[in-house]
Amino acid sequence: MVQSGPGSDDSARLIPPSPAGPLTPGQSHGSARFTRYYSQAIARGEDFELHWTDAVGGDRVFAAEANSMRLAEIEASAHLTDDEGLRRSLARDRGHPPQWDPGAPGYSRLLRPGKWTETPDSPYGLGTRNNPLAAWVHCAADPAIYPFGSRLTVVELEGLMAPDGTTLGRHIWVADSGNEITGALRFDWMVGADATYQALGDALRREHYETLVEAPPLL
């Protein structure tokens, strides 16, 4: 898991990206586009049977609402409260992207059931290296441009209060990827649970922030 590190010097010089060719992850600066993603709560329903493998290898089934199931598939992580009242965190197998049946009533149904795995220590799903994702300090990016562990510095975020009570720092680390997250200065920010996402204020819904990107240290 990528760990948050100490703050950087405010006087650090921001180096603009080269206008020739794609950005490289050495060090670059520009107006980055941010979207947000979250762990989706799956509501009970009769539209869909969610199959997953629990923490001890057993097969479990949950009657889910198709709408929330569809959103969970898009986010690739989810949580639910099972018949025993236990909260269970789930992550979708990245090797099996969702496929939908356009002829199904309401929201389309997943054609590949049984491709979810319980992740009890990972309430917000797993990143590209099966690392638990953490809200506010992890994001998804194009791995061809920004390797795992690349650090983003967004000075404007420091000190802002998130809806869940977290005081934000200025650093975000690349720890995930997504099919729609491609290209330079394009990031998808993990913000925690779906309720937190819905409560985001204007300061945390902005689409663009001035961002310094630094490559991960060589190990």
Image (spheres, rainbow, N blue to C red):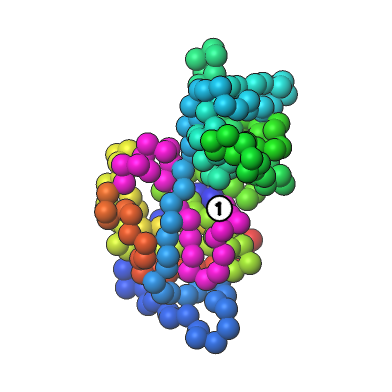
Count residues near mark 1 (Cα–Cα under 10 Å), then give few for <14, some for 14-19, many for 20+.
many
* Closest to the observer, 71 or 203: 71
Q: Quadrant of residue 142?
A: bottom right
In the rendered view, tell whether residue 180 sits above or below residue 32: above
Q: Residue at x 57, y 65 (%)?
A: 182
Does the magenta run of residues contain 180?
Answer: yes
Q: Which residue is mark 1?
A: 175
Side of 35 where 149 appears, left or right = right
Q: Where residue 129 appears, x then y in whole percent? A: 64, 49
Element type at marker 1? strand
In the rendered view, tell whether residue 176 sits above or below residue 150: above
Q: Residue at x 71, y 22 (%)?
A: 59
* Closest to the observer, 171 or 199: 199
Side of 130 where 135 appears, left or right = left
Q: Quadrant of residue 98?
A: top right
* Closest to the observer, 173 or 32: 32
Q: Where residue 144 appears, x then y in whole percent? A: 63, 67
- Going by the numbered disc 1, the residue's amino acid type is Ala
Magenta highlight range: 176-200
